[in-house]
Amino acid sequence: MARQSFKHMLNMEPKIVQANAMPKEILESLELEIAKCEDRTKILRILCLLSVTQNGLSKESYAYLTKEFADAFGIAELMRIMNLERAGLLKRQEKGTPFSVLRDTFKLVYEDINISAPNDIAYAYTGYAPLSIRLVERLIKTGWSVPECNL
């Protein structure tokens, strides 16, 4: 049972990044995972990923899911949610730059994967490359310069 839940949560990530899933579908899945008291870190990771890619969660969804999360895992978890808010990983919808710009700029979705001879990290992540890896790749290509400090 835990293995099925793990696979389900893992399959949600590429769907969110590739914009192949409806936010409502993901929110319903998260609601079910919260009700089953699955791994809270994984739930928050998916919730934050959805929040970042959708430029925030609707006010209704945000309020409902954070309440359900606190009910399931305890009121102390609200501190973790507040910290994620402060970090900008979990937020209510506002106007701003959509995730699609970031996805296109860093080529986070890679559709031309050569299965016989993989040439991109996206092969290991079901067609999408994590932003952290793309940032490291860009730093390797462009170089990392450390500013001099005159103390």
Image (tube, rainbow, N blue to C red):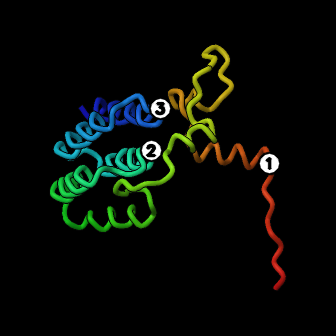
Please determine whether, in this image, residue 6 is positioned above or below residue 139. above
Does residue 79 lie above or below 58 as drawn? Answer: below
Residue lying at 24% horizontally and 49% vertically, measured from the top left: 61
Residue 21 appears left or right of 112: left
At horizontal 26% and vertical 63% (from top left) the residue drawn is: 77
Q: Is residue 102 above or below residue 90?
A: above
Where residue 106 sits: x, y (%)?
A: 63, 41
User: In the image, which is nearer the foreground, mark 2 or mark 1?
Assistant: 2
Distance (Cα) linking label 2 and label 1 = 26 Å
Q: Which quarter shows the N terminus?
A: top left
CB atoms at circles 2 and 3 under 8 Å apart?
A: no
Q: Which label's residue is closer to the chain start, 2 or 1?
A: 2
Q: Which residue is mark 2?
A: 53
Which is more foreground, mark 3 or mark 1?
Answer: 3
Marks 2 and 1 close (CB-CB < 8 Å): no
- Under mark 1, the amino acid is Thr
Q: Residue at x 20, y 65 (%)?
A: 75
Q: Secondary structure at mark 3?
A: loop
Q: Position of residue 54 (x, y in %)?
A: 41, 45
| Amino acid identity at mark 3 | Gln
Residue 18 - label = 3
Q: Which residue is mark 1?
A: 142
The quadrant where residue 150 appears: bottom right
